[in-house]
Amino acid sequence: MAAPIEELVDLDRNEISPQVYCSEEVYRREVETIFAKSWLLLGHESQVPKAGDFFTSSMAEDPVVVVRQRDGSLRAFLNQCRHRGMRVCRSEVGSARSFMCPYHGWTYGLEGDLKAVPHEEQYGEGFDKQSWGLRQVTRLETYKGLIFGCWDEDAVPIEEYLGDSAYYLDQLVDRLEGGTEVIGGVHKWLIDCNWKMPAEQFASDMYHAASAHVSAVQVFMPEDYDPQVHSMDQRKGAQFWTEGGHGGGYFFADTPNPAVWVDPVAQDWLRDTFDEASERLGRSRAARVSGHNTVFPNMSWLNGTNTLRVWHPRGPNQIEVWAWVIVDTAAPVHVKDAFRRGALRAFGPSGMLEQDDGENWVEVQKVLRGSTAAHNPLCYGMLEGRADQAEPDSAASHGPVFSDNAARNFYRRWLELMTGKSQREIEDRGVVNG
C-alpha cells in the first residue's frame, strides 16, 4: 500500500516518493481525480475536415470518438455501446454516416443518438431509444485548432485552463496566418514507464539533455563540433511554470536558431518567415524555435521540431505515446514534409533522441520494482528558492533553465487534484516561486 497521498509529495523538503510512479493505488486515484477533472488533448481539427469525418482517441483509459457534425461543429463520445459496453467504432480514423456496434448491432447516429436496435420489439413498449444514446464527453472545446475534452462539467474554459502557458503554445499553433495542420497522421507506440516521467521532463528538464542526448546531438553536428562551444550547457535560457501545473524551458535567441536535428529545409522556413511570425508573436517568441513544454497533465510539445504528443496512461507502469507533427498551413508541401522527416528522425518512434529518453524512463521504472527503491525519496531541490529570470511579456513564473522549479510546481498541482479539489475549488494555489 502507498503512503497517504499528502506524504508522497513533500515540497517543503523538495522530495518526491517513487510511489507516485509505481503504485497501482496511486494510479487508480489519478484516473479518478486528475484525468477526470483536467482538460485533455484529443487531436487536431485538421483530422476531421468534413461532416462525418471521425477519429478515435482516449481520455486516460476511456476510449472516445471525435466526430465532425453535419453543421460543422464537433462532438466527442465515449466509445462504448450502451448495450454491453463494446466499442462502437473500431477504426482509428475515417468517415461515416452512423456507427454500428459489431457485437449486437445497436446503431448510433453522428449526433450520438440511438437509431436502430435489432429486435427492438423484444424490449417492450417502455423501451425509449432516446435514453440510450452514446455518452457525450461533457465539455469539448478547441484552441487554435487543438481539440480538448473534459469530463468535469464545472471545468473552467480551455483558454482559462491553459492560462499563461498559452503564451508559449502559440509559438507552435499561431505563428502564421491560417494556423496549423497535422501532417503524416498519428504515430503511436508503447513505453514501459509511468506517464509522469515524460510529462514532468517536458515541463522542467533541460538538465538531462547534455548527458542523455550527447551522442545523438553529435551525429547532427558539423565536423568542427566543439563541446565547449556547441554544448547546451553553454547556452542561456529560462524555465517557466504556471498556476495550472504547466511548464517548459527554452534558450534565449535574437533570431531563429532551430535545433540541429530539424531538417535544413524546415530550418530555412522558420528563418524565412521570421518577420511575419514576429508581427503575430513579437520578436522574442518568434525567434524561440526550440524548447520543451507540458500542459498539465499529459500534453507536451517541442518548438521548432514541431512534435506534439500525449502521454496516454496505460496503468502505472506503461504509457501509449501519441505523436503528431504540426506544421503551418501556409507552408509549401515540401516544407511540411521536411518538418515531418526531421521530427521522425529525432523524436519519432525510432528517433535518435526519442530512444535516449525512452531508455531512461524504462530503466527508472525497472529500478522501482525493488521494495527499497520504490520508497527511497527522490531529490527535487535544484535551485530551490531562486527565480531570477523573467520574460517581460509573460505573466508566468520564471527561473533559470536548469532547475526543478517547474517540476515542483507540476507536483504541487498533482497534489491539489489528488487530494480531491476541483478546478474551481482551488483558489489559493500557492504557485511555486522557486
Image (spheres, rainbow, N blue to C red):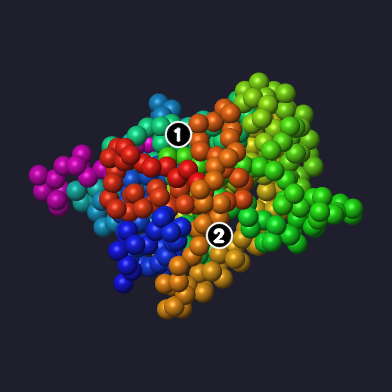
Q: Residue at x 60, y 45 (%)?
A: 400
Task: Check the image and report above or below for 164 versus 346.
Answer: above
Q: Is residue 310 visible?
A: no
For marks 2 and 1, give the CA distance.
30 Å
Task: Check the image and report above or below for 170 versus 15.
Answer: above
> Residue type at mark 2?
Trp
Asked if the residue under mark 1 is in contact with the one under mark 2, i.e. CB atoms within 8 Å, the reply is: no
> Residue type at mark 1?
Gly
Residue numbers of the magenta segment: 121-140
Taking depth in this image into account, of 413 and 351 the one nearest to the observer is 413
Label 2 Cα neighbours within 10 Å, binned few <14 / some 14-19 / many ≥20: few
Q: Residue at x 31, y 37 (%)?
A: 427
Label 1: state its secondary structure: helix
Is 392 included in the stretch rendered in magenta?
Answer: no
Q: Position of residue 237 (x, y in %)?
A: 66, 42
Q: Is residue 15 visible?
A: yes
Task: Check the image and report above or below for 273 versus 400.
Answer: above
Label 2 or label 1, whichever lies nearer to me, is 1
Q: Position of residue 370 (x, y in %)?
A: 46, 78
**What is the quadrant of residue 29 in the picture?**
bottom left
In this image, 310 relative to 108: left or right? right
Label 2: state its secondary structure: strand
Residue where numbered disc 2 is placed? 189
Name of the residue lying farthest toward the bottom? 371
Is 134 included in the stretch rendered in magenta?
Answer: yes
Taking depth in this image into account, of 35 and 414 the one nearest to the observer is 414
Mark 2 vs mark 1: which is more N-terminal?
1
Residue where numbered disc 1 is placed? 163
Taking depth in this image into account, of 224 and 58 the one nearest to the observer is 224
Q: Residue at x 59, y 33 (%)?
A: 391
Label 1 Cα neighbours within 10 Å, binned few <14 / some 14-19 / many ≥20: some
**What is the quadrant of residue 338 in the picture?**
top right
